[in-house]
């Protein structure tokens, strides 16, 4: 998204609509929307990664992604934007959950 474009609001009040500024090797705690999904403490591996195709058809953004690692798995933070730009949210996806889940909070634990 260019600097001049207005950032759409989050899809719901609980969800994030932007990925915070992160640096490689930051340890972050990621909270997700679903009660059935555990929150995770992960390490930032790459910032501004090229977008990777996901199974979530609503991810229309060409914004860069953030690659995270932890628990022997690679995770990706992605911007999920509505087709009309009415809303956007941050999603966390990983190989066994390629459709992603919405993110409610990202906190840096250690920089």
Image: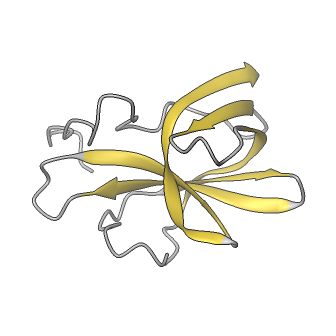
Report which quarter residue 74 is drawn in.
bottom right
Measured as percent of width and height from the top left, residue 78 is found at: 47, 55
Q: Is residue 78 left or right of residue 62?
A: right
Left or right: residue 99 versus residue 66 is left
Q: Which residue is drawn at 70% across and 31% down?
A: 29
Q: Where is residue 24 in the image (x, y as percent from the top left)?
A: 72, 40
Task: Report the colour scheme.
Answer: secondary structure
What residue do we see at 75% from left, 21% from top? 109
For the point 51% across and 54% down, which residue is it?
A: 101
As drawn, which residue projects farthest toward the front?
36
Residue under the image location 31 percent in, 68 percent down: 58
- Compared with 57, 59 (above or below) is above
Residue 25, x across and y down, in percent: 79, 38
Q: Give whichever of 14, 48 is nearer the camera.
A: 14
Residue 12 or 18: which is nearer the viewer? Answer: 12
Residue projecting furthest to the right: 72
């Amino acid at each position: 998204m260019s600097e001049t474009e207005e950032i759409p609001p989050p899809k719901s009040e609980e969800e994030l609509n932007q990925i915070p500024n992160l640096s490689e090797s930051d340890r972050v705690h990621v909270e997700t929307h679903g009660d059935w999904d555990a929150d995770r403490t992960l390490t930032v591996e790459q910032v501004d990664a090229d977008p990777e195709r996901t199974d979530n058809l609503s991810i229309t953004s060409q914004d860069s992604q953030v690659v995270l690692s932890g628990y022997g798995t690679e995770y990706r933070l992605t911007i999920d934007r509505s087709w009309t730009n009415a809303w956007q949210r941050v999603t966390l996806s990983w190989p066994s959950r390629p459709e992603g889940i919405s993110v409610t909070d990202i906190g840096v634990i250690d920089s």
